[in-house]
Image (cartoon, rainbow, N blue to C red):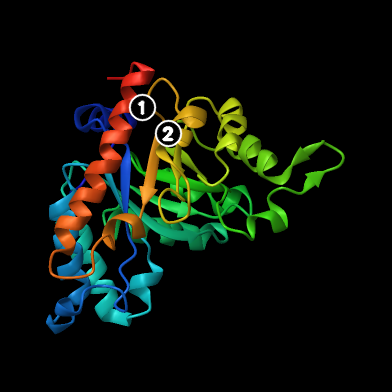
Amino acid sequence: MYNGLSRKQLIAQIKAKKSFLCVGLDTDLTKIPAHYLKSDDPIFEFNKDIINATKDYCVAYKPNLAFYECHGIKGWEALQKTIDYIPKDQFVIADAKRGDIGNTSKYYAQSFFETMNCDAVTVAPYMGHDSVLPFFEFENRWVILLAMTSNEGALDFQFLKLDHEKKQVWEKVVLKSSQWGTPENMMYVVGATRPEMLADIRKLVPDHFFLVPGVGAQGGTVEAVAKYGMNDDCGLLVNSSRGVIYAGNDENCARAAEEAAKELQEQMAAALENKGII
C-alpha cells in the first residue's frame, strides 16, 4: 500500500531535481491536440505523454478534478489511471477543493488518500475546523487549504477587514487554521498574481509550504514568488498548468511541454541557489 510522501521526502525531491515545479493536469478535450481524440482514452494518453516529458523537471502533479468529473465514469477512470502512472517519488495533489461537515469530509479524505492514493487534497475552509480536521487523520497525507487565491473574485471576501480585529479575512483563516495542522501535513494556497502578499502570509506561517498557482498564463513569475515566499526549506510548490501542458498544440506537444517545464525548472534552480538551499 502506498504510504504517501512526507515533508522530508518532498524537500529531498526539491533539492535533487533543483525544482519546486508542480504541473497542473487540467486536461481539456477541446484544447488537447486532435490526434489524441482518436484514442479510446484521450485524457489519459495526453496525460501520459505530458508526464513522460516533464517528470524530470517537476516534483508534483496536480490534476484538477473538474476536468475529469465532467466526463462521468470515463473521466474518473482516466483520473485514476493518471494517478497510477505518475512516478511514486512525485507529490500528487487532488485539486478538488472539498470541505463539508465532518462525516462527509471523512469520506472525501478516504476517497483521495486511500482509494485514489493522492498525497494531498485542496480543501475549502469556509465551514470551519470540523470540515477540515478529518483530512488530518491520514499519515503522510496533506491538506492544502485555500488561503489567498489568485482569481478576481478573491476580492469579494478574502480581503475584507474584520473591524474588531483589524485583520483581513485571509489573515484570520491562516492564523486560525494553523492551529489545526502542522508544517508536516498542511500547506496553503497562495496566488502568484499578488506576490508581495506572499511576504505577509509567510510572516504568519514561516514553516508551511505554499501551493502557488498563477505562474505563467495568469501572469505570475517564479522570481517574484521566490523573492517573497521562499523559506529556508524552499517552502514552495509553484503550479503551472496551461503554460506547460498546452505549450504546443500538435504532435510535438510533449516536446513543447518538456521545454516549458525545463525553462521553469532552470528559473527555480537559480532561485534555490540564490537562497543557498542547493
* Residue at 45% over, 53% down: 122
Give the image quarter of residue 20: top left
Q: Is residue 129 above or below residue 179?
A: below
Marks 1 and 2, how far apart at CA? 7 Å
Indicate the position of residue 234 as horizontal and vertical percent values.
Answer: 38, 27
Q: Give coordinates of residue 112: x percent, y percent.
A: 34, 58
Do callouts 1 and 2 mark residues in contact (Cβ within 8 Å)? yes
Residue at (51% x, 47% y) in the render: 145
Q: Out of 68 and 49, give the one closest to the viewer.
A: 49
Residue at 33% from the left image edge and 25% from the top image edge:
272
Q: Residue furthest top?
A: 276
Q: Position of residue 224 (x, y in %)?
A: 48, 35
Q: Quadrant of the C terminus?
A: top left
Whether residue 18 is situated above or below residue 126 in the rendered picture: above
> Toward which corner of the image does residue 73 lie, by quadrant?
bottom left
Check disc 2 and give the amino acid type.
Glu
> At label 1, which amino acid type do we have?
Ala
Is 20 on the left-hand or right-hand side of 224? Answer: left
Q: Residue at x 56, y 35 (%)?
A: 198
Q: Circle 2 — which element?
A: helix
Rendered location of residue 72, percent (x, y) = 33, 81
Q: Which residue is mark 2?
A: 223
- Residue that numbered label 1 is attached to: 271
- Label 1 crowd bin: few (<14), some (14–19), many (20+), radius 10 Å: many
Residue 9 in sight in this render: yes
